[in-house]
Image (cartoon, rainbow, N blue to C red):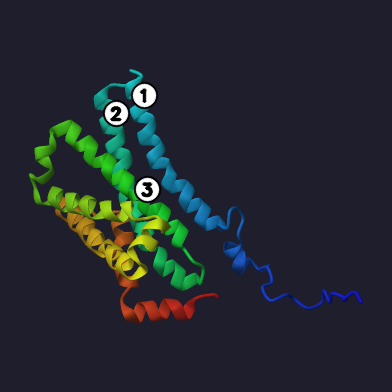
Amino acid sequence: MTAVLDRSQPGPNPEPTTRTTWHRRRVWNGFTPLQLAVIVLATIAPLVITGSIGAALLGVISTEQMIETALGAGENPGLVVFGAMFLASPVQWLTGRTQVRVRKYLGIVFFLLALSNAAMFVLEVGAGAMLSAPFLVAGTIALVLSAPLFATSSRRSQRWMGMKRWRLLHKATYLIAAALLAHVVMLGEFGFGETMIAAGFVARIPAVRRWLTARGDR
């Protein structure tokens, strides 16, 4: 006998249809509209840097122009990208939707931007200047700490290290965030990216985390 499907009853996981849940719909490759927007925006700075390097190699712009463009595209956007990555977990607590893939992508982009920024700085003034001032030391520490996180960002690394050791290593994210805040505070600057990083620390206060989790629209 052929079973009759009762279409009046929703399935176990009905598709959200209200305006309040539009941001939870998957529109491409499992990503929501907000996640895709974050990924696209985070990709702009690496593309600008790549384009400036290519233009310099082709002789379209000078080395000085390349350095200026790459530094401009790497510093503040890099802080914003890291801030978005640092806020990914609080967003997950609030929305009830995993942000692991977005956080991983943002972490990779941040490292590439930080590496580019350091390379351009060295190209401009020399490697010795990396440790010539406290704010530069803080920035260098953030870059050095982010390198092993970048190198172990794959699932293969998780399996090889074991989740316990992998998670322990990736807690260095907190040290990177602190080093970045120290870097900009010593520079006398505090912009959007720095505010996002500070908000990430506030969101991890146990009482705030419990509040975010309780407010989650799961």
- Near mark 1 (Cα within 10 A), the count class, few <14, some 14-19 or many ≥20, is some
Q: Mark 1 sits on what residue?
A: 55
Specify whether residue 150 is in view. Answer: yes
Q: Amino acid at mark 1?
A: Ala
Q: Look at the picture and state if 95 lies above or below 141.
A: below
Q: Look at the picture and state if 66 lies above or below 151.
A: above
Q: Amino acid at mark 3?
A: Val
Residue in the image at 36% along x and 19% along y: 58
Residue in the image at 40% along x and 55% along y: 154
Q: Quadrant of the C terminus?
A: bottom right
**Percent of width and height locating residue 68:** 26, 32
Q: Which mark is residue 66?
A: 2
What is the distance, in whole Å, between disc 1 and disc 3 at their CAs? 21 Å
What is the distance, in whole Å, between disc 2 and disc 3 at their CAs? 19 Å
Q: Which mark is residue 203?
A: none
**Percent of width and height locating residue 32:** 56, 58
Q: Look at the picture and state if 196 lies above or below 151.
A: below
Q: How many marks?
A: 3
Tell me the quarter of the picture where residue 20 sits.
Answer: bottom right
Element under disc 1: helix
Residue 15 left/right relative to 50 = right
What residue occupies the far front of the structure in this picture? 160
Q: Mark 3 sits on what residue?
A: 109
Q: Earlier in the sequence, mark 2 or mark 3?
A: 2
Residue in the image at 48% along x and 78% along y: 215
**Percent of width and height locating residue 149:** 30, 56
Specify whether residue 199 is in view. Answer: no
